[in-house]
Structure formats: structure tokens, C-alpha cells
Image (tube, rainbow, N blue to C red):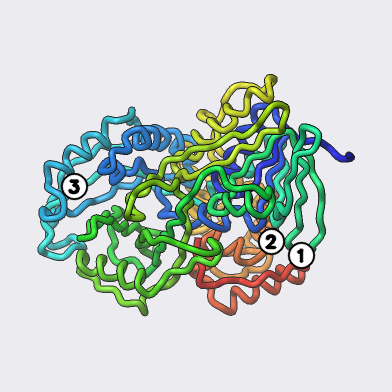
Amino acid sequence: MSGEIRDILVIGGGINGVGIAADAAGRGLSVTLCEMNDLASATSSNSSKLIHGGLRYLEYHEYRLVREALAEREVLLKKAPHIIEPLRIRLPHQAHLRPAWLIRIGLFLYDHLSKRNLLKGSHSVKFGDSDPLNNTLRKGFEFSDARVDDARLVILNAFEARNQGAEIKTRSRCVEAVRVNELWKVTLENQLTGSSETLYARALVNAAGPWVSHLFNDALKVQPEKQIRLVKGSHIIVPKIHTQTEAYMLQNEDERIVFVIPYEEDFSLIGTTDVEHEGDPGAAEISTEEVDYLIEITNQYFKAKLAAKDIVATYSGVRPLISDESENAQAVTRDYTFELSSDGNQAPLLSIYGGKITTYRKLAEAVVDRLSPFFPLMTAPWTATQHLPGGDFSDRRAHSQSLARELPWLPSSLCERYTRTYGTLCKTFLQGVKNIDDMGEHLGGGLYQREVDYLFESEWAKSAEDILWRRTKLGLVLTDSEQDALNQYILQTYGLEIALESQQCA
């Protein structure tokens, strides 16, 4: 056997995988993470972009999950003020769906199940003619949660993991993992070159998300320890249907809820659905039925009426939920669990099932704690109080204004976007820049060569899709010709040409 032995090899570059890699590396362990595609290329970039306690989970008596998520909401708002911000959500009341007293009890619990310092509490609201809702809707409720750039949450956790000494390998698929002499021998296949490499690790973490069972079957050659249900959630993005800053939570006759969220300045994000999914999680797409469902419920509530032709982009994510006895997909628990297998002196395997983006940090901490008997020199948990990279400030507006004073030639729109995308990390690619010409070629939509180079060199980007839909959301505004120009620049500069899926959005 040759080569360095790592303490932990994490398989999966979604939010759980990168969170575990960062936590473990920060506790003094040597860590490698592998991801078969791009970071956040599946479920973790296809969420509703919310950091929330899960108000509707109270109906299913998921009190522990809601309490933990509400506590984590406070932690994450402090950790990542650049990519997470408070959001007020309005819930129009329809008495035949849920009585007002039931909603008031739910909101009381939501306000008080966990300590709340950063967000305002809930209250009743009255809607008038100036509100965007249909005139038949006059009463409702308003409460607090937060919104997040979910893909960047993944990228920044990977960034932190690397800062702590972890090795991040993207486009590297685990094709085989076997126990050899108290170690894991793992074969990775580079998805760009086809080459293979062998790594050794003292522990293996299966954080493959919706592929968690596939990894057992394909690489480990054993049966999965637990069964999961794959549930597809789809969203549509349309030009903004109202000018207010609040999001709306819409109740439907089937007891599901749909969010309408202000998104990227000029758009509204509408979702999600809950549909059982079979087959490859990476092939999930929104169906005509899901499009009709989201448009119909939105039109029931809002004065502005939507049609399928208004849709700018769509995306679908497959959530790996713990299989339970629930008949309906929306009732399946969003809680998480993990299974540790290690008999005698066998190298441990820890597999993660379920979870939600809001509780990723707690899950990661619990996973690494569970592995602590195998690594007695591991240090204490640390992530609760550590800012994510670029988040070492407290106020977005103040940071954007400071950036504008420091770089008066930089357009205010870029100061704002750089702040909410990179935070203080933007100074990495702005260092030494004296004027807009120093930013290099303008590729459209405020995307300059210097930012593209930074994303390739520092944030694992390998394609235009990585940049336009995960590192940024500029795929919403770049024209086809501008996207072609970006592809051409990448090909000429980095020798990479990966097909851009222009209709997919993160």
C-alpha cells in the first residue's frame, strides 16, 4: 500500500458532505471530500432557498426538528450575513383550510419553541386594495424566517473545509470502496479525464444524498442499511408578480403549501411540489402537471395572473427522505438519521439519511461526534460561532456602501451583488483593480473576466453552468449569445467545454 492515509473520506459534495468535511477538518482530522459532479449540483442547489424552522412540520408533530431548526436559523444568520438574510412571510387566511385559532397556536409555538434574538415575532395582518392579493383575501398572518443562497452555502462550507486543511475533489466519482487491513481502500474516477486514483481512509462517510442507496449497491456492493423515499420538489421562476419585500405562503385544498418568494431583485420564486420520484435523481425535471399546479394556486391568490409562457426558468430537486409509513409525500419526515457500521476492528462506515438544509450544521456536528471514539485526539466542536468565509461583517448595506466608497468606479449594482454573493471574499478578485477596465472582458450581466477567473481558480468552477446557476444566478439575465461567449472564454482559457443546461436554475 502506498499513498497518504486520510482520517475521513466524505462521499458527496452537497450541504451535508461539505458541512461534515469542514467540521471534521476544523477538529484536527485529515479529510478528503469527493463529489462526482459539481458542488451543490443536485438537491442542495434546488431547494426553496429558505432557512426556516418549518412551520408546517408542526402539523405532523415534528417538535424536536422544528426546535432545532429554529435554533439553527439564529446561528446561520450570524454565520453568513452575506448569503442569508431575514425574510418576512405572509400567510393569507382561508378559514375553510385551517382555522385562525390553529394558525395562531402554530405561530405562538414557532415564536417560542427556541430562543429568538434576530427576528421579529408573528402578528396578524389586514390586506387592502394596495396589496397584491385578490380582493377576497382580507386577513392573514405574518411571521419571520430567512432566505439563503443555497448553492453558495455549499460552496462556502467547502471553502471553509479547505481553509481547515481538507482536500476537495470535484468531478471525482467513487466507483469502489472496500475494507482492507482496517482501512477503506477507495477508487475514484475523474469524470473529466477518465483517469482513476486510489485513496485510503480510516473512516468513510456516505453523504451522497439521493444517491446514498446507490453508493451501497454500486461501490460498496452491499445492501443499504435503511430505505429512503425520493421526493421531487419543483419550482418555477417568473418575473416578479409584486413589488413588496415579503414572501407569501399559500395554502392549498390538498393541505400542501406553496411559497412565493422575492428572488434576485427582478423575479419571483414559486414552489415547491412534493411528488414521489423514481429513477436517476440527476434526471429530475418539472412536469407539466407540476407547472399547472404551481400556476393554478398562485393565480388563486394573486391579482397578477401567470401563464406557462411567463416562466423564465425551472428547477427540480430530489430529496432523500427517511422512509416511513406516511401515505403522502408531503407528510414524510424531514428529520435526519445516520447509521454507523463497524464490527470489531473494521474501519467505520457512517451513512446519512434524510435531513434539510437548515439543520446541516447540527447534522455535521453530530456525525463527527459519532466518529469521535475512532479519533480520540479530535478537538471540540467549533462551527457554531465561526463565520463562513466572507461573512465577517454584520450588515449587508453597510458593507456594500463601504465597498462603494473604497472602489468608487465600481457600479452600485455590482457592490450589492458582490456583497450578497461573496461578502469580504470579493476583495480577493478586486485586489489591485484600479478601474472597470482592469476587470477584463465584460461577458454580460455584470460578469467580468476577473470574477470568472476567481471562480475557476478558487471556487472549483469548471463550466459556464457552474458559474451561471450555482456560483451566481446570472443565468437568469445573460442572453444566449452572452452565455455562448462565456463558454468560449472558458474553452480558450481553461480548455474545458461542458454543456450548459440553460433552463436549469439553482
Q: Quadrant of residue 445?
A: bottom right
In the image, is residue 59 above or below residue 75? below
Kindly report the distance in space between the C-alpha atoms of the residues bearing marks 2 and 3.
Answer: 44 Å
Provide the residue designation for mark 1. 494
Precedes in sequence: disc 3 or disc 1: 3
Residue type at the position of mark 1: Tyr
Label 1 element class: helix
Q: Nearer the viewer, residue 472 or 382?
A: 382
Precedes in sequence: disc 2 or disc 1: 2
Label 3 element class: strand
Marks 2 and 1 in Cβ contact (< 8 Å) = yes
Provide the residue designation for mark 3. 141
Precedes in sequence: disc 2 or disc 3: 3
Q: Nearer the viewer, residue 394 or 198?
A: 198
Residue 104 in the image: x percent, y percent? 16, 40
Provide the residue designation for mark 2. 462
